[in-house]
């Protein structure tokens, strides 16, 4: 998060050489661009309370009211001049930005295409006892139309009316009021996630459509914005890397439980030093983190804050300042992937589908922490984390007591803390076998590459009583033949049997089960894709895992749970489906209304 600066330098015109080094500023394209710039100004001024109002989809009116450090009366005129800013002076300042704005263009661009009124009182004027401590300035189409004074506390109110009144070409392209309103809501939500310590309120056509408490707690803010019923739906993300070095960076955030997965990336918010960014490389790193752990095509609810030294970030590459360049992109990316992966691998599934109102939310019905009857859901996410033990940590899973087997398919177990677990026996076994195969296969490969000294564990290859013949298509047969040594490393001993036929002599698991599936597995092994090895391992695991319908004694249940406990991703089967349903104590309390 950016540092809040309550002290400011006077607004001044940037010298031409500095102005030239700045990437061309954003053109005001639609109402949301105005709101974004005004929000950034309020946050740069250290505001803790920000109200946004809009009417007529923003064309009639947009207003942002903040309690930031304000603008002194004698500088107000300069605030609306092009390339005038209080935030940078020299070119070098671009390398250590602490503010969201730096180009000194936003107010000027807005004032050129609308009527803008600014009322502002500088925080230092509050001690001077002036009679009219707030100055007011109105501009229309870039010309000053009115100056005056008003009474108010420190802070700034910017009101924008009649947007594009003098740009008919733009007016013509404005979408429906509702569309513009939705964009504005999205941008306010974004900054509310970026700045949990600031209280945000959005009023659209006289209705409050979004509001946060400014608690400073990111999890609580997400719960407020997305109306989440339980804070335990959010898994914390946290990592501090290269500590002590000049490149030290931190990751902090939350990722939603797998049950909150969405069809679009709309709920993925990434901030670098308090700046909301859209960055292909960072998005790729995030996706690599959840690939295989969420169903295909699904995306998580995610808020990620990356904090790094200002000199490792270049924000001056894109007009909207939403694209950034990171000096140490590779390091940051790999940390992101690992952190997300670790959080999701242990995210259990929830007992019922959640009604997740998300951005459609119109009214905040109740804020977390003010739940009825002082419920045992922690009052703040801070407390909650202190209480929380990861429900799928190895220790916790290993401590489960199996109670029964349901439908010969699901193990019912109880944890020492009183929460309840349902474990899908087939998927659990599949996960255990898959990880075993993958580990041993990786060991074999490393040995081939000379990276190991021969201590690797080979997957057990079970010789078939009778070799099995499989037949492939011509193009498959060639690939399959090339891969014979690799297949041996997976416990699949095969040889060419003339033409397009192959003899399978051994398999890595239970042969009664695998034999019937050899044609299908051979086709996976002959697939022309980059991830055929993984897909084959998944296929092998799936086909050799115990099926549903098999009766398990208590000891078998216990040993399956123990094997699952030591898996690296005990909550998700290799196809991305849930293995564990978890009814937490607080869930039971909530639903029974105890
Ligand atoms: P920039 O933010 O890039 O400096 P702007 O055109 O957005 O450029 O704003 C110009 C200047 O006006 C800012 O540098 C800042 O000093 C002042 N200013 C604008 N909005 C506010 C605000 N809400 N509170 C305090 N100062 C503001
Ligand atoms: Mg600005």
Image (cartoon, grey):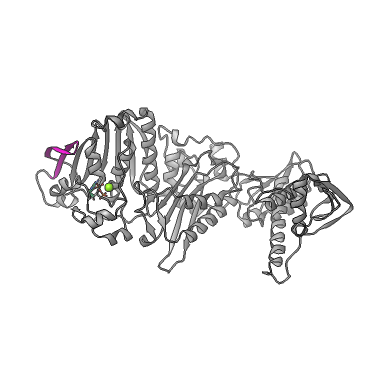
Please tell me whether residue 171 is drawn above or below residue 307 in the rendered image.
Answer: above
In the rendered image of this protein, does residue 278 appear above or below residue 145?
A: below
Q: Nearer the viewer, residue 551 or 346?
A: 346
Quadrant of image for the N terminus: bottom left
Tell me which residue sits at (36%, 54%) in the image.
315
Residue 113 image position (x, y, % from top left): 24, 36
- Per the rendered image, the range of residues in magenta is 133-148
Q: Residue furthest left?
A: 131
Query: Quick check: is 142 in the magenta stretch?
Result: yes
Q: Residue furthest right?
A: 466
Q: Residue furthest bottom?
A: 453
Q: Is residue 526 left or right of residue 3?
A: right
Decide if residue 545 is in sight here: no
Q: Is residue 77 above or below residue 459?
A: above
Give percent across and percent down for residue 260: 54, 41
The image shows residue 300 at horizontal and vertical percentages of: 52, 44
Quadrant that contains the C terminus = top right
Camera-nearest residue between 199 and 174: 174
Q: Residue at x 71, y 72 (%)?
A: 453
**Magenta segment, principal secondary structure?**
strand
Residue 134 shown in magenta: yes
Residue at the (47%, 63%) spot, across then down: 241
Q: Nearer the viewer, residue 8 or 236?
A: 8
As drawn, is 470 to the left or to the right of 202? right
Could you tell me which residue is drawn at 48 percent across and 34 percent down? 357
Query: Left or right: where does residue 59 sit relative to residue 503?
Result: left
């Amino acid at each position: 998060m950016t540092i809040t600066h309550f002290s400011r330098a006077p607004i001044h015109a940037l010298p031409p050489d500095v102005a030239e080094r700045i990437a061309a500023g954003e053109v005001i394209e639609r109402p949301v661009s105005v709101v974004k710039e005004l929000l950034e100004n309020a946050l740069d001024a250290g505001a803790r309370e920000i109200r946004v109002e809009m009417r007529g989809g923003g064309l009639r009116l947009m207003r942002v009211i903040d309690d930031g450090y304000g603008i002194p009366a004698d500088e107000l005129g300069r605030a609306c001049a092009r390339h005038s800013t209080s935030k940078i002076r020299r070119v070098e300042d671009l390398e250590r930005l602490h503010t969201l704005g730096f180009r000194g263009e936003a107010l000027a661009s807005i004032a050129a295409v609308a009527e803008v009124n600014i009322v502002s009182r500088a925080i230092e004027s509050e001690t001077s006892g002036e009679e009219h401590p707030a100055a007011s300035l109105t501009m229309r189409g870039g010309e000053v139309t009115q100056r005056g004074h008003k009474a108010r506390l420190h802070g700034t109110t910017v009101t924008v009316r009649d947007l594009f009144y003098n740009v008919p070409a733009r007016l013509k392209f404005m979408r429906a009021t509702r569309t513009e309103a939705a964009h504005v809501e999205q941008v306010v939500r974004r900054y509310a996630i970026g700045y949990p310590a600031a209280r945000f309120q959005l009023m659209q056509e006289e209705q409050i459509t979004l509001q946060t408490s400014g608690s400073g707690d990111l999890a609580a803010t997400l719960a407020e914005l997305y109306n989440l019923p339980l804070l335990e739906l959010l898994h914390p993300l946290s990592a501090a890397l290269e500590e002590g070095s000049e490149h030290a960076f931190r990751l902090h955030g939350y990722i939603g439980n797998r049950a909150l997965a969405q069809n679009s990336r709309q709920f993925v918010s990434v901030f670098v030093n308090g700046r909301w960014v859209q960055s292909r490389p960072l998005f790729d790193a995030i996706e690599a983190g959840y690939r295989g752990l969420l169903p295909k095509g699904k995306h998580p609810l995610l808020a990620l804050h990356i904090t790094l030294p200002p000199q490792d970030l270049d924000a001056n590459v894109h007009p909207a300042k939403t694209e950034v360049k990171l000096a140490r992109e590779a390091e940051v990316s790999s940390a992101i992937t690992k952190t997300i992966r670790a959080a999701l691998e242990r995210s259990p599934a929830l007992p019922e589908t959640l009604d997740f109102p998300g951005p459609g939310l119109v009214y905040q019905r109740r804020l977390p922490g003010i739940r009825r009857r002082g419920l045992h859901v922690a009052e703040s996410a801070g407390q909650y984390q202190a209480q929380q033990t990861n429900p799928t940590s190895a220790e916790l899973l290993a401590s489960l007591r199996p109670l029964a087997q349901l439908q010969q398919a699901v193990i019912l177990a109880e944890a020492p803390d009183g929460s309840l677990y349902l474990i899908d026996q087939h998927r659990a076994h599949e996960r255990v076998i898959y990880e075993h195969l993958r580990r041993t296969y990786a060991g074999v490969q490393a040995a081939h590459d000379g990276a190991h000294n021969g201590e690797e564990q080979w997957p057990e290859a079970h010789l078939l009583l009778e070799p099995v013949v499989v037949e492939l298509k011509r193009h498959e047969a060639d690939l399959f033949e090339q891969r014979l040594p690799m297949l041996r490393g997976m416990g699949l001993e095969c040889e060419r049997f003339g033409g397009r036929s192959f003899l399978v002599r051994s398999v890595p698991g239970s042969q009664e089960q695998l034999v019937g599936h050899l044609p299908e597995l051979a086709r996976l092994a002959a697939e022309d894709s980059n991830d055929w090895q993984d897909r084959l391992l998944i296929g092998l695991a799936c086909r050799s895992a115990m099926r549903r319908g098999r009766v398990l004694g208590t000891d078998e249940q216990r040993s399956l749970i123990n094997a699952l406990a030591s898996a690296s991703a005990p909550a998700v089967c290799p196809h991305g489906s849930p293995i564990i349903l978890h009814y937490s104590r607080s869930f039971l309390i909530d639903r029974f209304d105890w």
